[in-house]
Image (cartoon, rainbow, N blue to C red):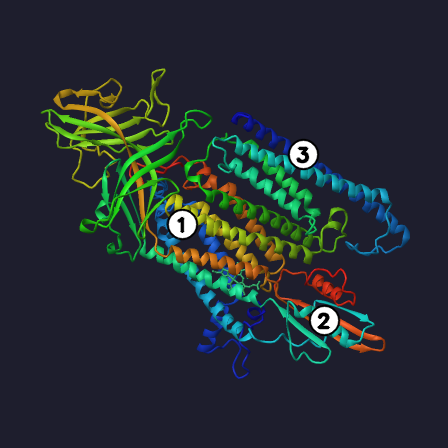
């Protein structure tokens, strides 16, 4: 807006001092003006766009930690440099923050004075007609045979409907202005940007995002220890966890059996039984069909169904015949066909620990001697696992989805394999050699991955963007303009000068002026559209 | 009709639309070459009527020497023909879209993979052009629009084609319709805005050269700037609605986080910021005109990069039509996803 543009960007030179010398206050004021200038806002916006780019090309730790890890392994020389630059966490890095904080400061510095100016100017009259209307970019003049008063009266009537008119416009002129709300829209938009940022900040500071993989039927309650992974905001406190508990009673899924997308799954539905509160305060049990795109909200907490897979029930008996392991074991899908990977760790088996590592074929088939998986549905499940024995290195921290074989021994097995491989269908049991024990595949269950998160401030952010959109529309679509008509008496009637000044940057002011002229003509017939 | 027949119909309609767009393009070229003939005739008429060699032709100036009627008629005829063909192509294109949606069981909107997004996006570009060309005096932009639509349509048929199927689960939401309609609409409008900005820059470079042929029909620089601004200011709120309101609402429902710095989100945000910068640039002294037009083109580039390019640069996108296999890990179970 002109106010920001025409401000001098350098202080007026003081004759008593050498050029270039500024005192501290002036320097500060100079810096402030620079910071809050439109040009700086523009440059900062472009910088922000630029700064967001690397985060979309380099895997981000907070978006996909696995990918980030793989990337780091693959790029040994670049990784330390990138790490220093914060390129694995661009949107949390200091330099990214620096840009948007500067932008916010610039925004505040820009908006506050403009709001004050606007508040003062809100009741102001449209300015007097400039002396030389012909100097304005859009102007015209014509001669009318009507008396000046008639033309002026009509001009007031025509403009008065949609414009604010200057009361003491002076002799022979009409000053009109419209579009005061445009500036309101613009201010609202910029303020709303701040509201969005506030909402977003609340979410990332006080919220959390956690997840858990649960085999169907396993009860779960909302305490920190029950999460598989938990990413809190920096100001999150565990007291904010809502007490509740739930169990996935049943999990439905539909597999496409025909068509080009056969084998694709849809219609996931986790039938949830949940209760708010804990212990004595526990509320009544309720049911909910947790589906994709249909999260469940309990208090401030939202539950989402975001993944699923198979958990073969595997039982390991040791050499002495004791059950040392028997439970549904979560296998992780390797692709959309749910060919899955999993491990079993039975360290306590006697005489030696037993470890299994291998794959699940939900629909196993033997095609020309090769095992293949035909479908994601568990039509013919087979587990195919390699057997290890001895020390599974369970004393060190490790993932439940990885078997540490660094200290383990192999088991003599089929020729050509590093260790024994056992293939089992449900209901089958296989004896391990050397009196190690046996492994049974008892059946198959499913697991669901439930994401549980709190996002405080989300309604603030939403309200913010909606306000921003409203403000934006006001700011972009409300036409703001000033129009002047000056009528000078002549021998045969009057000379009418009309001029307009557009303040919104998107208007065809010449067109507006010529339409106004048309409406100033005596015949009221076929008036063009209202200006 | 069976699903398979619908799918065939869709493919045929898209191919037919491509052919008719091509015919429209030829008609535009014919209009163009007739324009050149008119110019030549006018030039001849002018040099015989007066020796004003140094005068610069003015686009719509009344001082144009008269030209024989049949030639100008031919220009108008080809122009109308091109527009008619464009309208037919667009209608056939629409049939292609609808039948694509009908070919899925259950029937759905045709927006579940890159191929479908691209054929929808190009449809909207052509449709917006048809709707506004008269009102905003954009008929001169026709050849560019058709050329663009035709090229992208070919790209989508050759490289992006994907067989039809039901919506992946995560896309199965009413928000899909709201989000995609607004995103595609804004994309179409921004694309046309990018074209007018590009023409602005080209015309600017030609400043001083005689305005012959097609150039004579391109409006003045001020007018071009104004039209670009209007198109962008139409598209910007829609884009805001698509990527900053409906996108996050839907992301919250489907992926549990309304903003997760997914590459698609990041680029939608970058596009938004670039266009915000464009709007600022237009009101900043020294950035008006040329620099603003350049920013508008940068905006178009980020827009289409996000639409197609980012899928090839980044595999972490949760947007399922990016075609990535659901990321599954042995260490981070967090990466298991449903329905892509
Ligand atoms: C978060 C950063 C910002 C964003 C996203 C943003 C976005 C926008 C958008 C989209 C517009 C166009 C709507 C309109 O024309 O009213 C606009 C206009 C405007 N912005 Fe910003 N802006 C930001 C920061 C700033 C800052 C820091 C300033 C002050 C220096 C500023 C001053 C203005 C002014 C004066 C206009 C009105 C231009 C006109 O009259 O057309 N903005 N802004």
Chain to which mark 1 belongs: B
Q: Quadrant of the N terminus of chain B?
A: top right
Quickly name the residue at label 1: B258
Instruction: Name the residue carrying label 2.
Output: A155
Write down the quadrant of residue A441 in the picture.
top left
Of tags 1 and 2, the one toward the viewer is: 2
Residue A470 x, y percent position in the rendering: 51, 59
**A217 to B189, vertically: above or below:** above
Mark 1, secondary structure of its residue: loop
Tag 3 subunit: B
- Looking at this rendering, what residue extends furthest in the bottom direction? A16
Mark 1 vs mark 2, CA separation in Å? 53 Å
Which sits in the foreground, A299 or A205?
A299
Q: Is residue A315 left or right of residue B130?
A: left
Give A318 or A252, whichever is nearer the viewer.
A252
Cα gap from disc 3 to disc 1, whole angstroms: 42 Å
Q: Residue farthest to the top?
A: A368
Q: Are marks 2 and 3 in contact (CB under 8 Å)?
A: no
Q: Position of residue B199 (x, y in %)?
A: 66, 50
Marked residue nearer the N-terminal end (3 or 1): 3
Report how far apart the C-alphas of labels 2 and 3 lie in the structure.
52 Å
Disc 2 crowd rating (10 Å Cα; few below 14, some 14-19, many 20+) is many
Location of mark 3 (residue): B20
Q: Are marks 2 and 3 on the same chain?
A: no
Query: Given the image, what chain letter belongs to the residue carrying mark 2?
Result: A
Q: Are marks 1 and 2 in contact (CB under 8 Å)?
A: no
Q: Say if mark 3 contacts mark 1, CB within 8 Å.
A: no
Image location (x, y in percent) of residue B323: 45, 36
Q: Which label sits in the foreground, 2 or 3?
A: 2
The disc at residue B312 is: none
């Amino acid at each position: 807006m002109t106010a920001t543009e025409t401000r001098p960007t350098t202080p007026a030179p003081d004759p008593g001092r050498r050029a270039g010398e500024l005192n501290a206050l002036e320097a500060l004021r100079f810096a402030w003006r620079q910071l809050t200038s439109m040009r700086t806002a523009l440059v900062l916006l472009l910088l922000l766009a630029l700064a967001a780019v690397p985060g979309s090309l380099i895997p981000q730790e907070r978006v996909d930690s696995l990918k980030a890890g793989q990337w780091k392994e693959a790029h040994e020389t670049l990784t330390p440099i990138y790490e220093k630059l914060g390129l694995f966490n661009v949107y949390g890095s200091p330099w990214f923050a620096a840009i948007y904080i500067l932008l916010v400061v610039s925004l505040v510095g820009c908006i506050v004075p403009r709001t004050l100016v606007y508040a003062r100017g809100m009741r102001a009259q449209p300015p007097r007609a400039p002396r030389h209307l012909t100097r304005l970019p859009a102007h015209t003049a014509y001669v009318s045979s009507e008396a000046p008063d008639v033309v002026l009266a009509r001009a007031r009537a025509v403009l008065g409907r949609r414009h604010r008119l200057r009361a003491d416009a002076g002799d022979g002129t009409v000053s009109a202005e419209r579009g005061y709300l445009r500036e309101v829209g613009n201010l609202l938009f910029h303020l709303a940007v701040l509201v969005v940022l506030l909402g977003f900040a609340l979410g990332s500071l006080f919220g959390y995002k956690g997840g858990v993989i649960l085999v169907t039927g396993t009860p779960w309650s909302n305490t920190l220890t029950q999460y598989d992974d938990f990413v809190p905001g920096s100001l999150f406190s565990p007291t904010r966890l809502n007490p509740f508990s739930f169990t996935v009673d049943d999990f439905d899924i539909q597999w496409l059996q025909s068509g080009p997308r056969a084998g694709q799954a849809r219609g996931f539905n986790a039938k949830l039984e949940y209760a708010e509160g804990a212990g004595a305060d526990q509320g009544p049990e309720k049911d909910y069909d947790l589906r994709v795109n249909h999260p469940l909200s309990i208090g401030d907490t939202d539950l989402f169904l975001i993944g699923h897979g198979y958990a073969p029930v595997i039982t390991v008996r040791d050499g002495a015949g004791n059950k040392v392991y028997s439970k549904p074991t979560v296998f992780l899908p390797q692709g959309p066909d749910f060919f899955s990977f999993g491990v079993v760790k039975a360290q306590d088996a006697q005489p030696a620990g037993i470890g299994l590592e291998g794959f699940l074929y939900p629909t196993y088939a033997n095609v020309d001697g090769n095992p293949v998986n035909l479908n994601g549905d568990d039509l013919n499940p087979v587990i195919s696992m390699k057997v290890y024995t001895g020390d599974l290195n369970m004393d060190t921290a490790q993932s439940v989805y990885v078997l540490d074989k660094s200290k383990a021994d192999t088991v003599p097995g089929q020729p050509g394999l590093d260790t024994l491989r056992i293939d089992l269908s449900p209901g089958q049991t296989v004896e391990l050699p050397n009196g190690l024990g046996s492994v049974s595949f008892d059946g198959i269950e499913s697991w669901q991955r439930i994401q549980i998160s709190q996002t405080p401030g989300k309604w603030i952010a939403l309200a913010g963007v909606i306000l921003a959109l409203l403000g934006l529309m006001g700011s972009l679509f409300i036409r703001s303009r000033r129009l002047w008509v000056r009528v000078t008496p002549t021998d045969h009637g009057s000379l009418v000068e009309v001029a307009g000044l557009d303040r919104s940057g998107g208007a065809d002011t010449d067109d507006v002026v010529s339409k106004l002229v048309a409406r100033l003509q005596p015949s009221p017939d076929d008036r063009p559209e209202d200006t | 009709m069976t699903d398979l027949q619908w799918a065939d119909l869709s493919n045929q309609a898209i191919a037919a639309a491509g052919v008719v767009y091509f015919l429209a393009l030829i008609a535009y070229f014919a209009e163009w070459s007739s324009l050149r003939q008119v110019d030549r005739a006018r030039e001849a008429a002018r040099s015989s009527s007066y020796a004003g060699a140094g005068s610069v032709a003015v686009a719509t100036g009344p001082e144009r020497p008269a030209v024989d009627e049949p030639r100008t008629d031919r220009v108008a005829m080809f122009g109308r023909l091109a527009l008619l063909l464009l309208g037919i192509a667009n209608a056939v294109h629409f049939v292609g879209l609808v039948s694509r949606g009908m070919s899925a069981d259950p029937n759905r909107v045709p927006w579940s993979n890159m191929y479908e997004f691209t054929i929808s996006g190009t449809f909207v570009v052509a449709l917006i052009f048809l709707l506004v060309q008269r009102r905003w005096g954009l008929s001169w932009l026709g050849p560019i629009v058709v050329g663009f639509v035709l090229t992208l349509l070919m790209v989508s048929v050759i490289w992006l084609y994907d067989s039809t199927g039901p919506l992946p689960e995560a896309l199965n939401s009413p928000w899909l319709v709201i989000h995609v309609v607004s995103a595609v609409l804004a994309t179409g409008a921004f694309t046309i805005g990018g074209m007018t900005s590009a023409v602005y820059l080209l015309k600017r470079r030609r400043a001083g050269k005689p305005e012959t042929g097609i150039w004579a029909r391109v409006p003045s620089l001020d007018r071009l700037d104004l039209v670009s601004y209007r198109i962008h200011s139409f598209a910007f709120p829609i884009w805001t609605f698509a990527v900053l309101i409906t996108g996050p609402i839907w992301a919250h429902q489907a992926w549990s986080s309304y903003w997760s710095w997914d590459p698609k989100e990041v680029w939608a945000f970058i596009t938004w910021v670039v266009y915000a910068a464009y709007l600022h640039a237009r009101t900043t002294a020294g950035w008006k005109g040329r620099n603003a037009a350049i920013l508008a083109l940068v905006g178009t580039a980020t827009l289409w990069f996000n639409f197609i390019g980012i899928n090839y640069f980044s595999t972490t996108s949760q947007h399922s039509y990016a075609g990535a296999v659901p990321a599954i890990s042995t260490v981070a179970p967090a990466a298991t996803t449903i329905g892509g």
